[in-house]
Image (tube, rainbow, N blue to C red):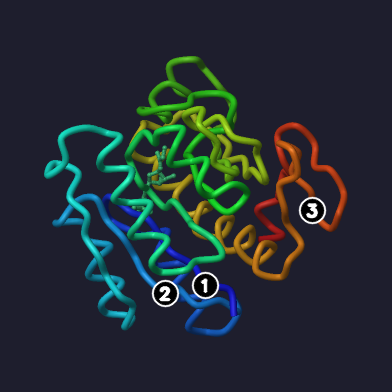
Amino acid sequence: MTRIVVLISGGGSNLQSLLDQCQTGSLDADIVAVISNRPDAFGLSRARQAGVKALTLDHTGYANRAAFDAALAELIEAQQPDLIVLAGFMRILTDDFVRRFPGKMINIHPSLLPRYPGLNTHQRALDAGDSQAGATVHFVTAELDGGPPIAQVEVPISDQDDAESLARKVLAQEHRLYPTVVDWFVKGRLRLDANQVLLDDQPLPKGGRLLDTASL
Ligand code: GAR
């Protein structure tokens, strides 16, 4: 069975959706460990509740980014994962770290990349007057939120939306998008080949596959 390590920094609602899908069997994978860089991350309790190993590697205990990333890479490798899933893991990763897991690490980001990498994505979409917000799952490369996109969902922005309401709506779609993409990987349908994303051996368009929320 596919061994998954999930990295978190906070609430872990995306983690929860993956745990739920594994528990019901709709995702045929084994989440072997959850690792947080923050000791107080609520997602750690979610992991324990589901009987999954919950580990903390506190970044504040390391002299610099390289030292933390080296320790994190070792901790991940000790779990022997087939896939590393970043789910609200709010750390910039070093090139050396990312290069240790080529084609094996994915991230979810709350915007329609390449628009709005980094923080405050929803407020930035509102400020720009966008009609659509959304989320992207992408392979992780050394560029922040810049790796090749795998799939996106769009969420319409209404006149009444503020950053908070938009975050809620997008997060609800993330909970459906992420298990879908993880399922592709688990079934051996998804791979990264020289920076090109292949699904069922077919190259995906530049922004990844746009998923219809109704189909999720
Ligand atoms: C999610 O919206 C995720 O897309 C975002 O953090 C939130 C985590 O929520 N990730 C990023 O911004 C990464 N650049 P969760 O802890 O409830 O899953």
In this rendering, the label closer to the viewer, 2 or 3 = 2
Foreground residue among 9 and 192: 192
Residue type at numbered disc 2? Val
Tell me if mark 1 has few (under 14), some (14-19) or many (20+) residues whose alpha carbon lies within 10 angstroms of its own.
some
Q: Mark 1 points at which residue?
A: 3
Q: Residue at coordinates 42% horizontally, 29% vertically from top-left?
A: 121
How far separated are the C-alphas under marks 2 and 3?
25 Å
Query: Does the closest atom of ligand 1 sit within 8 Å of the Cβ of label 2?
Result: no
Q: Mark 2 points at which residue?
A: 32
Q: Is mark 2 on a helix, strand or loop?
A: strand
Residue 199: numbered disc? 3
How far separated are the C-alphas under marks 2 and 1?
6 Å
Foreground residue among 48 and 35: 35
Foreground residue among 99 and 216: 99
- Judged left or right of residue 165, residue 115 is right
Q: Are marks 2 and 1 in contact (CB under 8 Å)?
A: yes
Q: Position of residue 37 (x, y in %)?
A: 24, 50
Say which quarter of the image contains residue 161: top left
Residue type at numbered disc 1? Arg
